[in-house]
Image (spheres, rainbow, N blue to C red):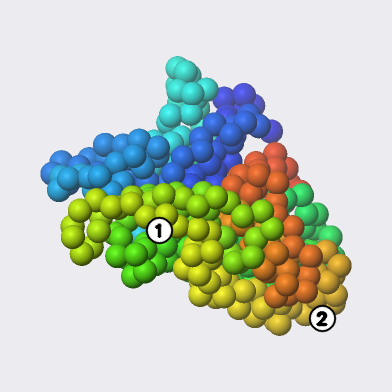
Amino acid sequence: MGFFDFLTEEIAIDLGTANTLIIHNDKVVVDSPSIVARDRISNKIIAVGQEAARMQGKTHENIKTIRPLKDGVIADFDASEKMISLFIKNIPALKKKLFPPSLRMVICIPSGITEVEMRAVKESAERVNGKEVYLIHEPMAAAIGIGVDIMQPKGNMIVDIGGGTTEIAVIALGGIVCDKSVKVAGDVFTNDIVYYMRTQHNLYVGERTAEKIKIQIGAATEDLEVPPEEMSVQGRDLLTGKPKQVQISYREVAKALDKSILRIEDAVMETLSQTPPELAADIYNTGIYLAGGGSMLRGLDKRLSQKTDLPVYIAEDPLRAVVRGTGITLKNLNKFKSVLIGKKN
Ligand SMILES: Nc1ncnc2c1ncn2[C@@H]1O[C@H](COP(=O)(O)OP(=O)(O)O)[C@@H](O)[C@H]1O
Ligand SMILES: [Mg+2]
């Protein structure tokens, strides 16, 4: 604790491919889509988060919406830096301050990002007054957020299904023992639905509509115990060019998603097969924990459980498990120093 610590504010950031969340003073103060809108002529960022998300799919030629972290890598450095800085600057409690406070932060990053990208995130954070900036890998933060005691000599398996990537990790003694990151997650599910509607119904739907279908009636299996009602979907008829509506059931969505879910199942099986036997024995008892928005797909937990013969648990509030874990790490920097990237011992 330094003398000027009262001038320092602490924030925890989950920089997700789909959503960015920030905790400040134990509260989630930012929960926004990781999207920016840019004016093509002036090259200025004109909106971030929710506001930019509303423009998605409805832009004209002068405005472009960008998902800077789309596939679990930083696709657009400049846009991601502006996004991080605007989210931080808009935290209400910090906005009120006369001087911008210096920040101590822990940022959770997708584990697929490279050293260069990590440095870029860190530097972006430093440019918005980050005096102490630490990074943490996503599955680690998810595990902490779920409430797993990661320091124990005991294996736990975490599967975090986000927007761009599914991150699978076996964690023990505060480290990642084996892991796998596949680029099959929520975004791919959404695209599967766009493709299915086009090929099976001749209906052209946008990504936002497809995501709505996924959330409202999406399923990972065709035999759900509590099936959701059919849904009316509107889009453009590919044959006539006219707007059209069709009814679809969760079974169709399950068909559309089947191949992608199979790929996630395979990745989980592969990670299990690489797990050292003592840790595999632990996982036999503890099961698999799911986090991330994708884990809310109906029946996915059951399907994974049948495939692996293991109990599968969905984290409480799975969209916030990672930021919760990042927040816990921030408050216990010393305890978790071994899992932080950039913390001097
Ligand atoms: N109820 C739901 N069922 C299925 N998918 C969902 C649901 N809610 C959100 N999602 C999906 O979860 C993904 C976002 O999850 P999130 O954990 O925030 O990702 P990231 O960490 O990559 O930002 C999106 O693809 C979104 O469509
Ligand atoms: Mg995430």
Percent x, y for residue 25?
Answer: 63, 29
Q: Is residue 145 left or right of residue 70?
A: right
Question: How much space separates mark 1 and mark 2, taking CA atoms?
Answer: 35 Å
Indicate whether 277 appears above or below 341.
Answer: below
Instruction: Answer yes or no: disc 2 within 8 Å of ligand 2.
Output: no
The amino acid marked with disc number 2 is Pro
Percent x, y for residue 16?
Answer: 50, 51
For mark 1, what is the residue?
70
Percent x, y for residue 102?
Answer: 51, 32
Choose top left, top right, bottom left or bottom right for residue 262. Answer: bottom right
The residue that appears at 55% across and 75% down in the rendered structure is 263
The dot on residue 277 is 2
Q: In this view, does 289 lie to the left or right of 81?
A: right
The residue that appears at 58% across and 41% down in the rendered structure is 12
Percent x, y for residue 333?
Answer: 69, 45
The residue that appears at 32% across and 56% down in the rendered structure is 205
Instruction: Describe the element under mark 2 as helix, strand or loop.
Output: helix
Query: Looking at the figure, which quarter contains the C terminus?
Result: bottom right
Q: In this view, does 238 lie to the left or right of 86?
A: left
Instruction: Describe the element under mark 1 as helix, strand or loop.
Output: loop
The amino acid marked with disc number 1 is Lys
Residue count near mark 2 (Cα–Cα under 10 Å), binned few <14, some 14–19, many ≥20: few
Q: In this view, does 17 lie to the left or right of 320?
A: left
Residue 128 appearing in the image: no
Number of numbered discs on residues = 2
Query: Looking at the figure, which quarter contains the N terminus?
Result: top right
Residue count near mark 1 (Cα–Cα under 10 Å), binned few <14, some 14–19, many ≥20: many
Indicate whether 45 appears above or below 148.
Answer: above
